[in-house]
Amino acid sequence: MNNSLIRSILILSALFLTSACSLIYDKHVQWETVKPEIFPVLYATGFAPISMQRSTHETQRMLMAIKASKIAAYAELAEQVYGQQVSGKVTMADLLIEDQQLTASVQGIIRGAKVIKSYPVGDVYTTELQLNFEDVYNIYQANQNRKEIKDVTHF
């Protein structure tokens, strides 16, 4: 009887103390948006051969090269922002290399990039992109409010 009474008192007092804390102390948190001091600017260049595009019409080959060079420039920007994943595989037999493979991939979303220049140089179409992280910051601020704690008041 004594053990069960003491155990009940301990459980009730623990419940009371934990619930009393939340009743006595309450807090109000104020949030403040923090803007970085500096914003980097990245540049990327993409190239695509005009004559190797699969079309019989010269104008269509030019348009396809423009698009391909732009995609190549975006891929280069993604490499700079997110990095590039590289994986390799080597197969050996009798201590001799039989097969060696190396693959690379990049994946990411680029928002806020601007085309600076797009022009042909001989048989190659070139596209230059710029990614200003201040523009990226403003885009993300418009989509979601990233905030930090400004002040906490306990009552």
Image: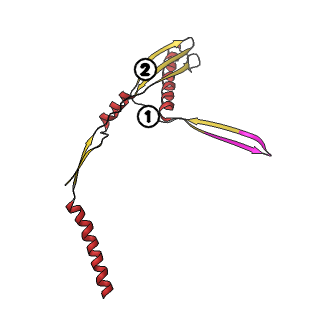
Q: Amino acid at mark 1?
A: Ile
Label 2: few (<14), some (14–19) or many (≥20) C-alpha neighbours in 10 Å: some
Quadrant housing residue 123: top right
User: Residue at 45% of width from left, 22% of height from top?
Assistant: 129
Q: Indicate whether residue 14 is drawn in magenta.
A: no
Residue 120 lies, with reference to residue 11, above or below; the image says above
Name the element at disc 1: loop
Label 1: few (<14), some (14–19) or many (≥20) C-alpha neighbours in 10 Å: few
Q: Which residue is mark 1?
A: 109
| Coordinates of residue 59 in the picture (x, y in percent) | 50, 14
- In the picture provided, is 35 more to the left or to the right than 77? left
Q: Amino acid at mark 2?
A: Val
Main SS class of the magenta portion in the image: strand
The quarter of the rendered structure image containing the N terminus is bottom left
- In the picture provided, is 105 more to the left or to the right than 142? right
| Coordinates of residue 44 in the picture (x, y in percent) | 49, 23
Q: Which mark is residue 17?
A: none
Q: Nearer the viewer, residue 86 or 99?
A: 86
| Coordinates of residue 71 in the picture (x, y in percent) | 49, 26
Q: Which residue is mark 2?
A: 115
How many callouts does the rendering have? 2
Q: Nearer the viewer, residue 89 or 29?
A: 29
Query: What is the magenta range?
Result: 87-99
Q: Nearer the viewer, residue 9 or 77?
A: 9
